[in-house]
Structure formats: C-alpha cells, structure tokens
Image (spheres, helix red, strand yellow):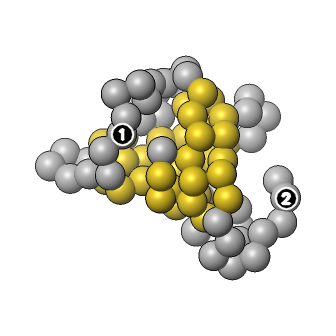
Amino acid sequence: MHSTLPGQRFKLSGVVKNGSIEIKKGTLENKFIITDFKNDLIVLYKGPLPATFREGDMASIGGFLADHKSPTCFVGTSV
C-alpha cells in the first residue's frame, strides 16, 4: 500500500470478496471488502450500489482512507 495524506482521495480497484457485502436494512449504508488476494480492505459506502456490483467481480471505488495512519478502512464516495 502506498502512503497517502490525510483526506487524500484516490481510486481503489480490486475484487469484491465473496461473502463480504453487508447492506444495512432500511438505509443506503453498505460495507464490503475489496481484495487483491494478498491484502483485504474494508470499504464503507453510503449510496445505492450499481446493479453490476457483485461478489467475486472487479470494482473501482473512489474515496479516501478513514485513517491514513492505519489503512484498514476505506470510505467510498463513488462506486
């Protein structure tokens, strides 16, 4: 993983990990994991997911790291 500045936006690409999509019922809050099969990153995204968004498929998410010092969670602003 490359270093980033606080709040720096970038695009994250990888595979949506099987079994990782969680949608909070009655909201647009989504949580899923993007993987490159070596590293996993939790993604939080608020908004409707595209109809083509599926586990096991490639996805590109724009956003920023929730905490640039501990890069384990990515806040998505676009999918």
| Residue 44 appearing in the image | no
Tell me the residue at 57%/53% (across/down).
Answer: 62
Task: Say which of marks 1 and 2 sits in front.
Answer: 1
- Please tell me whether residue 75 is drawn above or below residue 14 in the rendered image: below
Secondary structure under the numbered disc 2 in the rendered image = loop
The residue depicted at 14 percent of the width and 49 percent of the height is: 26
Near mark 1 (Cα within 10 A), the count class, few <14, some 14-19 or many ≥20, is some
Q: Nearer the viewer, residue 65 or 59?
A: 59
Q: Residue 35, located in which quarter of the rendered image?
A: top right
Left or right, 58 with reference to 4: left
- The spot of residue 60 in percent (x, y) is 59, 40
From the image, tell me which residue sits under label 1: 49
* Residue 58 shows in this picture: yes
Residue 23 is left or right of residue 45, and the answer is left
* Image disc number at residue 2: 2
Q: Residue furthest left?
A: 26
Q: Residue furthest right?
A: 2
x then y, percent, for residue 15: 62, 29
Q: Secondary structure at mark 1?
A: loop
3 to 55, vertically: above or below: below
Query: What residue lies at 56% left-to-right and 47% top-to-bottom?
Result: 61
Position in image of residue 38 (x %, y %)? 79, 34
| Identity, as a three-letter code, of the amino acid under mark 2 | His
Residue at the extreme top of the image, as rendered = 56
Between disc 1 and disc 2, whose residue precedes? 2
User: Which amino acid, by three-letter code, is at mark 1?
Assistant: Leu
